Amino acid sequence: MPYTSNPVSALRTLHQNCRRSKTVMNALINSTDPNEYDLICITEPYIYPNHRLTIATQKWVVFYAGGTARPRSLILVNKNIKSDTYRQIEVESRNATSILFKFSTTSSLQIYSIYNQPDSDETYDELSRHLFLNPPDHPMLWHGDFNKHDALWAGTNLPSSIPADEAMALLKLLADYDLELALPPGTLTHESAAHKTWNTLDLVFISANIADSIICCDALPDQRLPGADHLPILTTLDFDLLRIPEIPRLNFRAVDWDEFNKALTDSLTNNPITTDINSTDEYDLAYLTLDKTLQTTIASHVPRLSFSPYAKRWWTKELTILLGKTRKLERENRKRPCPEAEIAAQEAVKLFKTTLESTKMQHWKDWLEHADEKSVWLASRYANRPFSDGSAERIPALKRADGTLATDAQEKCDILFETFFPAAPDSNSLDIPADFEYPDPVPMPEFTREMYDEVIRDAKSYTAPGTDGIPFIVLQKAYHIIGDILWALFQATVRLKYETPLLKELFTAVLRKPGRSDYSVAKSFRPIALYRTIKKSFCGMYSKSLAYVT
Protein backbone atom coordinates (compact mmCIF):
# COMPACT_ATOMS: atom_id res chain seq x y z
CA MET A 1 0.00 0.00 0.00
CA PRO A 2 1.44 3.44 -0.85
CA TYR A 3 2.21 5.86 1.94
CA THR A 4 1.60 9.57 1.60
CA SER A 5 2.30 12.58 3.72
CA ASN A 6 -0.75 13.97 5.46
CA PRO A 7 -1.54 17.56 4.35
CA VAL A 8 -1.09 18.52 8.04
CA SER A 9 2.72 18.67 8.21
CA ALA A 10 2.92 18.24 11.97
CA LEU A 11 3.10 15.71 14.78
CA ARG A 12 0.00 16.11 16.96
CA THR A 13 0.03 14.58 20.44
CA LEU A 14 -2.61 14.67 23.16
CA HIS A 15 -1.93 13.98 26.83
CA GLN A 16 -4.70 12.96 29.26
CA ASN A 17 -4.70 11.66 32.82
CA CYS A 18 -7.70 9.31 33.10
CA ARG A 19 -7.52 8.84 36.91
CA ARG A 20 -8.00 5.06 36.34
CA SER A 21 -11.65 5.71 35.46
CA LYS A 22 -13.50 3.54 32.96
CA THR A 23 -15.91 6.40 32.26
CA VAL A 24 -13.10 8.87 31.51
CA MET A 25 -11.28 6.32 29.37
CA ASN A 26 -14.41 5.52 27.34
CA ALA A 27 -15.15 9.21 26.86
CA LEU A 28 -11.57 9.81 25.67
CA ILE A 29 -11.48 6.90 23.22
CA ASN A 30 -14.94 7.56 21.75
CA SER A 31 -14.68 11.35 21.43
CA THR A 32 -11.10 11.76 20.20
CA ASP A 33 -10.98 11.91 16.42
CA PRO A 34 -7.89 10.08 15.07
CA ASN A 35 -7.96 12.40 12.07
CA GLU A 36 -6.91 15.17 14.47
CA TYR A 37 -4.25 13.38 16.56
CA ASP A 38 -1.28 11.12 15.90
CA LEU A 39 -0.58 10.03 19.47
CA ILE A 40 -2.42 9.96 22.78
CA CYS A 41 -0.17 9.80 25.85
CA ILE A 42 -2.23 8.51 28.76
CA THR A 43 -1.33 8.47 32.44
CA GLU A 44 -3.34 6.56 35.04
CA PRO A 45 -5.30 4.70 32.32
CA TYR A 46 -8.19 2.40 33.10
CA ILE A 47 -6.86 -1.17 33.28
CA TYR A 48 -9.23 -4.13 33.40
CA PRO A 49 -9.12 -6.07 36.70
CA ASN A 50 -6.69 -9.01 36.70
CA HIS A 51 -5.22 -7.88 33.38
CA ARG A 52 -2.68 -5.43 31.96
CA LEU A 53 -5.04 -4.33 29.19
CA THR A 54 -6.90 -1.07 28.69
CA ILE A 55 -9.77 0.14 26.44
CA ALA A 56 -9.01 1.04 22.82
CA THR A 57 -10.44 0.87 19.31
CA GLN A 58 -9.21 -0.38 15.94
CA LYS A 59 -8.00 3.13 15.12
CA TRP A 60 -5.12 2.95 17.62
CA VAL A 61 -2.09 0.77 18.35
CA VAL A 62 -1.47 0.51 22.10
CA PHE A 63 1.95 0.47 23.76
CA TYR A 64 2.11 -0.30 27.48
CA ALA A 65 4.64 0.64 30.14
CA GLY A 66 7.14 -2.05 31.10
CA GLY A 67 7.21 -4.42 34.03
CA THR A 68 4.63 -6.97 35.12
CA ALA A 69 2.54 -4.74 37.40
CA ARG A 70 -0.53 -2.84 36.23
CA PRO A 71 0.75 -0.03 33.97
CA ARG A 72 0.29 3.59 34.98
CA SER A 73 1.27 4.87 31.56
CA LEU A 74 0.64 4.01 27.93
CA ILE A 75 0.80 5.52 24.45
CA LEU A 76 -1.77 5.16 21.68
CA VAL A 77 -0.33 5.55 18.17
CA ASN A 78 -2.64 6.29 15.26
CA LYS A 79 -2.76 3.15 13.09
CA ASN A 80 -2.53 5.32 9.95
CA ILE A 81 1.09 6.16 10.76
CA LYS A 82 3.57 4.09 8.74
CA SER A 83 4.48 1.28 11.13
CA ASP A 84 8.20 1.08 10.40
CA THR A 85 8.72 4.75 11.31
CA TYR A 86 8.35 4.03 15.02
CA ARG A 87 9.11 1.40 17.65
CA GLN A 88 8.77 1.04 21.40
CA ILE A 89 11.79 1.63 23.62
CA GLU A 90 11.44 -0.59 26.68
CA VAL A 91 11.66 1.20 30.03
CA GLU A 92 11.83 -0.96 33.13
CA SER A 93 9.02 0.90 34.84
CA ARG A 94 5.26 0.68 35.10
CA ASN A 95 5.24 4.48 35.11
CA ALA A 96 6.87 5.31 31.77
CA THR A 97 6.22 4.38 28.14
CA SER A 98 8.52 5.42 25.30
CA ILE A 99 8.20 5.43 21.49
CA LEU A 100 11.04 6.31 19.12
CA PHE A 101 10.02 7.94 15.83
CA LYS A 102 12.30 8.07 12.78
CA PHE A 103 11.12 10.81 10.43
CA SER A 104 14.12 10.53 8.10
CA THR A 105 17.75 9.41 8.17
CA THR A 106 18.64 12.62 10.01
CA SER A 107 15.46 13.39 11.98
CA SER A 108 14.09 11.47 14.97
CA LEU A 109 12.21 11.99 18.23
CA GLN A 110 11.80 9.87 21.37
CA ILE A 111 8.45 10.46 23.07
CA TYR A 112 7.73 9.55 26.70
CA SER A 113 4.46 9.24 28.59
CA ILE A 114 5.32 9.60 32.29
CA TYR A 115 3.39 9.26 35.53
CA ASN A 116 4.85 10.01 38.95
CA GLN A 117 2.92 9.30 42.15
CA PRO A 118 2.32 12.17 44.60
CA ASP A 119 4.93 12.52 47.36
CA SER A 120 7.31 10.21 45.52
CA ASP A 121 10.40 10.35 43.32
CA GLU A 122 10.14 6.69 42.24
CA THR A 123 9.58 7.47 38.56
CA TYR A 124 12.47 9.92 38.41
CA ASP A 125 14.81 7.33 39.91
CA GLU A 126 13.65 4.81 37.30
CA LEU A 127 14.06 7.32 34.47
CA SER A 128 17.50 8.34 35.71
CA ARG A 129 18.61 4.70 35.76
CA HIS A 130 17.12 4.04 32.31
CA LEU A 131 18.75 7.08 30.70
CA PHE A 132 22.10 6.33 32.35
CA LEU A 133 22.07 2.79 30.94
CA ASN A 134 20.64 3.93 27.59
CA PRO A 135 22.13 7.37 26.88
CA PRO A 136 19.69 9.15 24.55
CA ASP A 137 21.03 9.97 21.10
CA HIS A 138 17.70 11.41 19.91
CA PRO A 139 15.81 14.56 20.92
CA MET A 140 13.12 13.87 23.53
CA LEU A 141 9.55 14.96 24.24
CA TRP A 142 8.15 14.21 27.70
CA HIS A 143 4.40 14.25 28.37
CA GLY A 144 2.99 13.37 31.74
CA ASP A 145 1.50 13.91 35.13
CA PHE A 146 4.62 14.76 37.13
CA ASN A 147 2.89 15.56 40.45
CA LYS A 148 5.50 18.14 41.46
CA HIS A 149 5.20 21.86 42.18
CA ASP A 150 7.83 24.43 41.18
CA ALA A 151 7.89 28.06 40.18
CA LEU A 152 9.42 27.07 36.83
CA TRP A 153 6.05 25.81 35.63
CA ALA A 154 3.56 26.98 38.28
CA GLY A 155 4.58 30.64 37.96
CA THR A 156 2.59 32.82 40.33
CA ASN A 157 0.24 29.89 41.07
CA LEU A 158 2.85 28.09 43.21
CA PRO A 159 1.27 27.16 46.57
CA SER A 160 3.13 28.87 49.43
CA SER A 161 3.22 25.67 51.50
CA ILE A 162 5.33 23.73 48.98
CA PRO A 163 8.91 22.93 50.09
CA ALA A 164 11.52 24.61 47.90
CA ASP A 165 13.22 21.30 47.04
CA GLU A 166 10.09 19.25 46.27
CA ALA A 167 10.85 18.98 42.53
CA MET A 168 14.64 18.67 42.91
CA ALA A 169 14.86 15.14 41.44
CA LEU A 170 12.84 16.19 38.39
CA LEU A 171 14.76 19.44 37.94
CA LYS A 172 18.06 17.54 38.03
CA LEU A 173 16.84 15.20 35.27
CA LEU A 174 15.78 18.16 33.15
CA ALA A 175 19.19 19.79 33.58
CA ASP A 176 21.13 16.56 32.94
CA TYR A 177 19.39 15.96 29.61
CA ASP A 178 18.89 19.58 28.50
CA LEU A 179 15.09 19.60 28.53
CA GLU A 180 12.99 22.76 28.46
CA LEU A 181 9.42 23.44 29.54
CA ALA A 182 7.16 23.44 26.46
CA LEU A 183 3.89 24.25 28.27
CA PRO A 184 3.51 27.97 29.03
CA PRO A 185 4.33 28.63 32.73
CA GLY A 186 1.28 29.07 34.90
CA THR A 187 -0.98 26.90 32.73
CA LEU A 188 -3.53 25.30 35.06
CA THR A 189 -4.02 21.61 34.31
CA HIS A 190 -5.41 19.91 37.44
CA GLU A 191 -8.34 20.58 39.77
CA SER A 192 -7.97 19.30 43.32
CA ALA A 193 -11.08 17.33 44.25
CA ALA A 194 -10.56 18.04 47.96
CA HIS A 195 -9.87 21.78 47.82
CA LYS A 196 -11.47 22.76 44.47
CA THR A 197 -8.28 24.62 43.58
CA TRP A 198 -6.33 24.54 40.32
CA ASN A 199 -2.61 23.85 39.93
CA THR A 200 -0.01 22.78 37.37
CA LEU A 201 0.87 19.09 37.57
CA ASP A 202 0.59 17.93 33.94
CA LEU A 203 3.62 19.11 32.00
CA VAL A 204 5.39 18.86 28.66
CA PHE A 205 9.18 19.05 28.30
CA ILE A 206 11.21 19.08 25.08
CA SER A 207 14.90 18.86 24.19
CA ALA A 208 16.35 22.35 23.92
CA ASN A 209 17.83 21.73 20.46
CA ILE A 210 14.35 21.18 18.93
CA ALA A 211 12.37 23.67 21.04
CA ASP A 212 11.88 25.83 17.96
CA SER A 213 9.84 23.02 16.37
CA ILE A 214 6.93 23.71 18.77
CA ILE A 215 3.89 24.97 16.88
CA CYS A 216 1.62 24.96 19.92
CA CYS A 217 1.47 23.47 23.40
CA ASP A 218 -1.47 24.27 25.64
CA ALA A 219 -4.18 22.84 27.87
CA LEU A 220 -7.67 22.42 26.40
CA PRO A 221 -10.18 23.43 29.12
CA ASP A 222 -13.11 23.28 26.69
CA GLN A 223 -12.37 19.58 26.05
CA ARG A 224 -12.32 18.44 29.67
CA LEU A 225 -13.79 14.95 29.93
CA PRO A 226 -16.65 14.15 32.30
CA GLY A 227 -15.22 12.81 35.56
CA ALA A 228 -11.66 13.88 34.75
CA ASP A 229 -9.77 16.10 37.18
CA HIS A 230 -6.98 16.80 34.64
CA LEU A 231 -7.26 18.82 31.44
CA PRO A 232 -6.06 17.39 28.12
CA ILE A 233 -2.88 18.97 26.72
CA LEU A 234 -2.29 19.34 22.98
CA THR A 235 1.26 19.57 21.66
CA THR A 236 1.92 20.13 17.97
CA LEU A 237 5.45 19.89 16.57
CA ASP A 238 6.81 20.72 13.15
CA PHE A 239 7.63 17.12 12.15
CA ASP A 240 6.21 15.44 9.07
CA LEU A 241 4.96 11.87 9.53
CA LEU A 242 4.25 9.38 6.79
CA ARG A 243 0.61 8.38 7.10
CA ILE A 244 -1.40 5.68 5.36
CA PRO A 245 -4.24 7.21 3.34
CA GLU A 246 -7.71 6.15 4.39
CA ILE A 247 -9.22 3.77 1.84
CA PRO A 248 -13.00 4.25 1.50
CA ARG A 249 -15.00 1.12 2.26
CA LEU A 250 -17.96 0.21 0.09
CA ASN A 251 -21.32 -0.87 1.48
CA PHE A 252 -22.38 -3.75 -0.77
CA ARG A 253 -25.29 -4.47 1.60
CA ALA A 254 -26.99 -1.20 0.65
CA VAL A 255 -26.86 -1.48 -3.14
CA ASP A 256 -29.93 -0.96 -5.31
CA TRP A 257 -29.27 -4.05 -7.43
CA ASP A 258 -31.94 -3.24 -10.01
CA GLU A 259 -30.18 0.05 -10.78
CA PHE A 260 -26.79 -1.65 -10.61
CA ASN A 261 -27.77 -4.34 -13.10
CA LYS A 262 -29.39 -1.80 -15.44
CA ALA A 263 -26.16 0.21 -15.54
CA LEU A 264 -24.09 -2.96 -15.99
CA THR A 265 -26.30 -4.10 -18.88
CA ASP A 266 -25.97 -0.70 -20.59
CA SER A 267 -22.18 -0.79 -20.22
CA LEU A 268 -21.93 -4.31 -21.66
CA THR A 269 -24.18 -3.30 -24.56
CA ASN A 270 -21.77 -0.50 -25.42
CA ASN A 271 -18.72 -2.72 -24.80
CA PRO A 272 -19.76 -6.27 -25.73
CA ILE A 273 -17.60 -9.19 -24.57
CA THR A 274 -17.29 -12.29 -26.72
CA THR A 275 -17.89 -15.70 -25.20
CA ASP A 276 -16.01 -17.40 -28.05
CA ILE A 277 -12.51 -17.31 -26.54
CA ASN A 278 -9.90 -19.22 -28.54
CA SER A 279 -6.61 -17.49 -27.75
CA THR A 280 -4.78 -15.97 -24.81
CA ASP A 281 -5.15 -12.49 -26.35
CA GLU A 282 -8.92 -12.94 -26.59
CA TYR A 283 -8.89 -14.22 -22.98
CA ASP A 284 -7.01 -11.14 -21.73
CA LEU A 285 -9.30 -8.76 -23.60
CA ALA A 286 -12.47 -10.46 -22.31
CA TYR A 287 -11.32 -10.44 -18.70
CA LEU A 288 -9.98 -6.88 -18.74
CA THR A 289 -13.20 -5.57 -20.33
CA LEU A 290 -15.35 -7.40 -17.76
CA ASP A 291 -13.23 -6.20 -14.86
CA LYS A 292 -13.27 -2.59 -16.05
CA THR A 293 -17.04 -2.69 -16.60
CA LEU A 294 -17.68 -4.10 -13.11
CA GLN A 295 -15.32 -1.59 -11.48
CA THR A 296 -16.99 1.34 -13.27
CA THR A 297 -20.46 0.18 -12.24
CA ILE A 298 -19.35 -0.40 -8.64
CA ALA A 299 -17.82 3.07 -8.46
CA SER A 300 -21.07 4.73 -9.53
CA HIS A 301 -23.68 2.52 -7.82
CA VAL A 302 -22.20 1.15 -4.57
CA PRO A 303 -22.45 3.61 -1.65
CA ARG A 304 -19.57 4.18 0.71
CA LEU A 305 -19.86 3.03 4.28
CA SER A 306 -20.83 5.81 6.64
CA PHE A 307 -19.61 5.18 10.15
CA SER A 308 -17.83 6.94 12.97
CA PRO A 309 -14.08 6.89 12.35
CA TYR A 310 -13.27 6.30 15.99
CA ALA A 311 -16.20 5.44 18.28
CA LYS A 312 -17.17 1.97 19.41
CA ARG A 313 -20.40 0.60 17.97
CA TRP A 314 -22.39 1.21 21.15
CA TRP A 315 -21.48 4.91 21.27
CA THR A 316 -24.61 6.87 20.31
CA LYS A 317 -25.48 10.37 19.17
CA GLU A 318 -27.17 10.85 22.52
CA LEU A 319 -23.85 10.27 24.31
CA THR A 320 -22.12 12.77 22.04
CA ILE A 321 -24.78 15.40 22.80
CA LEU A 322 -24.64 14.62 26.52
CA LEU A 323 -20.84 14.91 26.47
CA GLY A 324 -21.14 18.36 24.90
CA LYS A 325 -23.68 19.50 27.50
CA THR A 326 -21.50 18.20 30.35
CA ARG A 327 -18.46 20.06 29.04
CA LYS A 328 -20.53 23.24 28.70
CA LEU A 329 -21.73 23.08 32.33
CA GLU A 330 -18.18 22.41 33.56
CA ARG A 331 -16.92 25.42 31.59
CA GLU A 332 -19.59 27.63 33.12
CA ASN A 333 -18.70 26.39 36.60
CA ARG A 334 -15.02 27.13 35.99
CA LYS A 335 -15.65 30.65 34.60
CA ARG A 336 -18.36 31.70 37.07
CA PRO A 337 -18.07 29.40 40.11
CA CYS A 338 -21.02 29.25 42.47
CA PRO A 339 -22.79 26.46 44.40
CA GLU A 340 -25.55 26.17 41.78
CA ALA A 341 -23.11 25.87 38.88
CA GLU A 342 -21.00 23.31 40.77
CA ILE A 343 -24.04 21.14 41.56
CA ALA A 344 -25.25 21.35 37.93
CA ALA A 345 -21.82 20.26 36.66
CA GLN A 346 -21.61 17.38 39.15
CA GLU A 347 -25.09 16.16 38.25
CA ALA A 348 -24.22 16.30 34.55
CA VAL A 349 -21.12 14.15 35.12
CA LYS A 350 -23.18 11.59 37.05
CA LEU A 351 -25.83 11.51 34.31
CA PHE A 352 -23.17 11.02 31.64
CA LYS A 353 -21.60 8.13 33.56
CA THR A 354 -24.89 6.30 34.17
CA THR A 355 -26.09 6.92 30.61
CA LEU A 356 -22.82 5.62 29.17
CA GLU A 357 -22.97 2.38 31.17
CA SER A 358 -26.67 1.77 30.50
CA THR A 359 -26.30 2.54 26.77
CA LYS A 360 -23.42 0.12 26.44
CA MET A 361 -25.26 -2.65 28.31
CA GLN A 362 -28.53 -2.10 26.42
CA HIS A 363 -26.75 -2.13 23.06
CA TRP A 364 -25.24 -5.58 23.64
CA LYS A 365 -28.45 -6.89 25.19
CA ASP A 366 -30.48 -5.80 22.15
CA TRP A 367 -27.83 -7.15 19.80
CA LEU A 368 -27.95 -10.60 21.38
CA GLU A 369 -31.74 -10.68 21.60
CA HIS A 370 -32.10 -9.86 17.89
CA ALA A 371 -29.12 -11.85 16.68
CA ASP A 372 -29.42 -13.46 13.26
CA GLU A 373 -27.38 -16.41 12.01
CA LYS A 374 -24.34 -14.24 11.32
CA SER A 375 -24.57 -12.43 14.66
CA VAL A 376 -24.74 -15.71 16.60
CA TRP A 377 -21.45 -16.84 15.10
CA LEU A 378 -19.96 -13.42 15.73
CA ALA A 379 -21.09 -13.56 19.36
CA SER A 380 -19.45 -16.97 19.67
CA ARG A 381 -16.20 -15.51 18.34
CA TYR A 382 -16.38 -12.65 20.84
CA ALA A 383 -16.99 -15.07 23.71
CA ASN A 384 -14.22 -17.50 22.81
CA ARG A 385 -11.41 -15.31 21.57
CA PRO A 386 -8.62 -14.26 23.97
CA PHE A 387 -9.22 -11.15 26.06
CA SER A 388 -7.90 -8.04 24.29
CA ASP A 389 -7.93 -4.25 24.50
CA GLY A 390 -9.72 -3.95 21.13
CA SER A 391 -6.88 -1.99 19.52
CA ALA A 392 -5.44 -2.39 16.04
CA GLU A 393 -3.01 -5.26 15.67
CA ARG A 394 0.51 -4.54 14.52
CA ILE A 395 3.28 -6.90 13.51
CA PRO A 396 5.88 -6.32 16.25
CA ALA A 397 9.63 -6.59 15.79
CA LEU A 398 10.32 -10.16 14.63
CA LYS A 399 13.17 -12.39 15.70
CA ARG A 400 15.83 -13.18 13.12
CA ALA A 401 17.55 -16.56 13.02
CA ASP A 402 20.31 -15.19 15.30
CA GLY A 403 17.79 -13.97 17.90
CA THR A 404 18.12 -10.26 17.12
CA LEU A 405 15.03 -8.24 16.24
CA ALA A 406 13.98 -6.97 12.82
CA THR A 407 12.03 -3.69 12.91
CA ASP A 408 12.06 -2.70 9.22
CA ALA A 409 8.78 -3.46 7.43
CA GLN A 410 10.45 -5.06 4.40
CA GLU A 411 12.60 -7.30 6.58
CA LYS A 412 9.53 -8.38 8.56
CA CYS A 413 7.86 -9.31 5.27
CA ASP A 414 10.91 -11.34 4.26
CA ILE A 415 10.93 -13.23 7.58
CA LEU A 416 7.21 -14.01 7.34
CA PHE A 417 7.55 -15.07 3.69
CA GLU A 418 10.37 -17.48 4.52
CA THR A 419 8.30 -18.90 7.40
CA PHE A 420 5.06 -19.31 5.45
CA PHE A 421 6.60 -20.42 2.17
CA PRO A 422 9.85 -22.32 2.84
CA ALA A 423 12.00 -23.23 -0.15
CA ALA A 424 11.15 -26.54 -1.80
CA PRO A 425 13.58 -29.38 -1.06
CA ASP A 426 16.05 -30.42 -3.72
CA SER A 427 14.37 -33.05 -5.88
CA ASN A 428 17.55 -35.14 -5.77
CA SER A 429 17.15 -35.49 -2.01
CA LEU A 430 13.77 -37.23 -2.35
CA ASP A 431 15.45 -40.49 -3.49
CA ILE A 432 12.65 -41.59 -5.85
CA PRO A 433 13.48 -44.90 -7.57
CA ALA A 434 14.03 -44.56 -11.31
CA ASP A 435 11.68 -47.48 -11.99
CA PHE A 436 8.91 -46.29 -9.66
CA GLU A 437 5.51 -47.27 -11.01
CA TYR A 438 2.90 -44.55 -10.62
CA PRO A 439 -0.79 -45.47 -10.36
CA ASP A 440 -3.09 -44.79 -13.27
CA PRO A 441 -4.52 -41.25 -13.39
CA VAL A 442 -7.88 -40.87 -11.69
CA PRO A 443 -10.58 -40.05 -14.24
CA MET A 444 -12.01 -36.60 -13.53
CA PRO A 445 -15.65 -35.71 -14.12
CA GLU A 446 -16.49 -33.28 -16.86
CA PHE A 447 -16.97 -29.68 -15.82
CA THR A 448 -20.55 -28.55 -16.40
CA ARG A 449 -22.38 -25.24 -16.34
CA GLU A 450 -24.60 -26.60 -13.57
CA MET A 451 -21.52 -27.12 -11.38
CA TYR A 452 -20.40 -23.55 -11.99
CA ASP A 453 -23.88 -22.21 -11.23
CA GLU A 454 -23.72 -24.03 -7.87
CA VAL A 455 -20.29 -22.60 -7.06
CA ILE A 456 -21.53 -19.04 -7.58
CA ARG A 457 -24.83 -19.65 -5.77
CA ASP A 458 -23.30 -21.34 -2.72
CA ALA A 459 -20.38 -18.94 -2.21
CA LYS A 460 -20.39 -16.71 0.86
CA SER A 461 -21.57 -13.36 -0.41
CA TYR A 462 -19.49 -10.97 1.69
CA THR A 463 -16.17 -12.72 2.30
CA ALA A 464 -13.08 -10.55 1.91
CA PRO A 465 -12.29 -9.96 -1.77
CA GLY A 466 -8.89 -9.95 -3.41
CA THR A 467 -7.00 -7.14 -5.10
CA ASP A 468 -9.98 -6.20 -7.30
CA GLY A 469 -12.22 -5.45 -4.31
CA ILE A 470 -15.18 -7.31 -5.88
CA PRO A 471 -17.00 -9.64 -3.43
CA PHE A 472 -19.09 -12.64 -4.47
CA ILE A 473 -22.34 -10.72 -3.91
CA VAL A 474 -21.63 -8.77 -7.13
CA LEU A 475 -21.22 -11.96 -9.18
CA GLN A 476 -24.33 -13.46 -7.57
CA LYS A 477 -26.59 -10.46 -8.13
CA ALA A 478 -25.37 -9.89 -11.69
CA TYR A 479 -25.01 -13.55 -12.65
CA HIS A 480 -27.94 -13.51 -15.06
CA ILE A 481 -26.06 -10.81 -16.97
CA ILE A 482 -22.43 -11.95 -16.76
CA GLY A 483 -22.86 -15.70 -16.14
CA ASP A 484 -22.18 -16.65 -19.77
CA ILE A 485 -18.99 -14.55 -19.79
CA LEU A 486 -17.72 -16.10 -16.53
CA TRP A 487 -18.44 -19.62 -17.80
CA ALA A 488 -16.67 -18.86 -21.09
CA LEU A 489 -13.62 -17.61 -19.18
CA PHE A 490 -13.53 -20.77 -17.07
CA GLN A 491 -13.85 -23.04 -20.11
CA ALA A 492 -11.04 -21.13 -21.82
CA THR A 493 -8.89 -21.48 -18.69
CA VAL A 494 -9.24 -25.27 -18.83
CA ARG A 495 -8.94 -25.54 -22.61
CA LEU A 496 -6.02 -23.11 -23.08
CA LYS A 497 -4.36 -24.01 -19.75
CA TYR A 498 -4.00 -20.26 -19.24
CA GLU A 499 -5.03 -17.52 -16.82
CA THR A 500 -4.58 -13.81 -17.37
CA PRO A 501 -1.82 -12.47 -15.08
CA LEU A 502 -4.34 -10.43 -13.05
CA LEU A 503 -6.05 -13.64 -11.91
CA LYS A 504 -2.77 -14.82 -10.46
CA GLU A 505 -2.49 -11.76 -8.21
CA LEU A 506 -3.20 -12.31 -4.55
CA PHE A 507 -3.06 -10.37 -1.34
CA THR A 508 -1.66 -12.22 1.66
CA ALA A 509 -3.13 -11.07 4.96
CA VAL A 510 -1.15 -11.98 8.08
CA LEU A 511 -3.21 -12.88 11.15
CA ARG A 512 -2.17 -13.66 14.70
CA LYS A 513 -2.65 -17.19 15.93
CA PRO A 514 -4.72 -16.74 19.11
CA GLY A 515 -3.27 -17.54 22.50
CA ARG A 516 0.43 -17.44 21.58
CA SER A 517 2.78 -16.20 24.29
CA ASP A 518 5.39 -14.59 22.02
CA TYR A 519 4.41 -12.65 18.91
CA SER A 520 7.98 -11.75 18.06
CA VAL A 521 8.22 -15.25 16.57
CA ALA A 522 7.04 -15.50 12.97
CA LYS A 523 5.37 -18.88 13.60
CA SER A 524 2.88 -17.09 15.86
CA PHE A 525 1.19 -15.77 12.69
CA ARG A 526 -0.66 -17.43 9.82
CA PRO A 527 -1.24 -16.32 6.21
CA ILE A 528 -4.59 -15.88 4.48
CA ALA A 529 -4.41 -15.70 0.68
CA LEU A 530 -7.04 -13.43 -0.89
CA TYR A 531 -7.45 -14.05 -4.63
CA ARG A 532 -9.71 -12.16 -6.98
CA THR A 533 -13.28 -13.42 -6.68
CA ILE A 534 -13.45 -14.75 -10.24
CA LYS A 535 -10.32 -16.79 -9.55
CA LYS A 536 -11.98 -18.07 -6.35
CA SER A 537 -14.94 -19.26 -8.41
CA PHE A 538 -12.58 -21.19 -10.67
CA CYS A 539 -10.88 -22.75 -7.62
CA GLY A 540 -14.35 -23.70 -6.39
CA MET A 541 -14.84 -25.71 -9.58
CA TYR A 542 -11.58 -27.58 -9.01
CA SER A 543 -12.56 -28.31 -5.40
CA LYS A 544 -15.99 -29.55 -6.44
CA SER A 545 -14.41 -31.82 -9.06
CA LEU A 546 -11.97 -33.31 -6.55
CA ALA A 547 -14.82 -33.87 -4.11
CA TYR A 548 -16.59 -36.03 -6.69
CA VAL A 549 -13.61 -38.39 -7.12
CA THR A 550 -12.73 -38.68 -3.44
Image: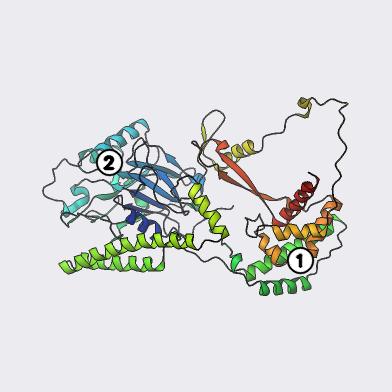
| Mark 2 crowdedness (10 Å alpha carbons): few <14, some 14-19, many ≥20 | some
Q: Position of residue 109 (x, y in %)?
A: 41, 45
To which quarter of the image does residue 278 belong? Answer: bottom right
Q: Amino acid type of disc 1? A: Ile
Could one spot residue 338 in this view of the protein? no
**Disc number at residue 174?**
2
Q: Which residue is drawn at 78% across and 70% down?
A: 271
Q: Residue at x 54, y 56 (%)?
A: 376
Q: Name the residue under label 1.
A: 482
Q: Amino acid type of disc 2? A: Leu
Vertical comparison of 131 with 237: above or below: above
Q: How far apart are marks 2 and 1 (CA)?
A: 70 Å
Circle 1 SS class: helix
**Disc number at residue 193?**
none
Could one spot residue 86 in this view of the protein? yes
Q: Position of residue 441 (x, y in %)?
A: 86, 40
Circle 2 SS class: helix
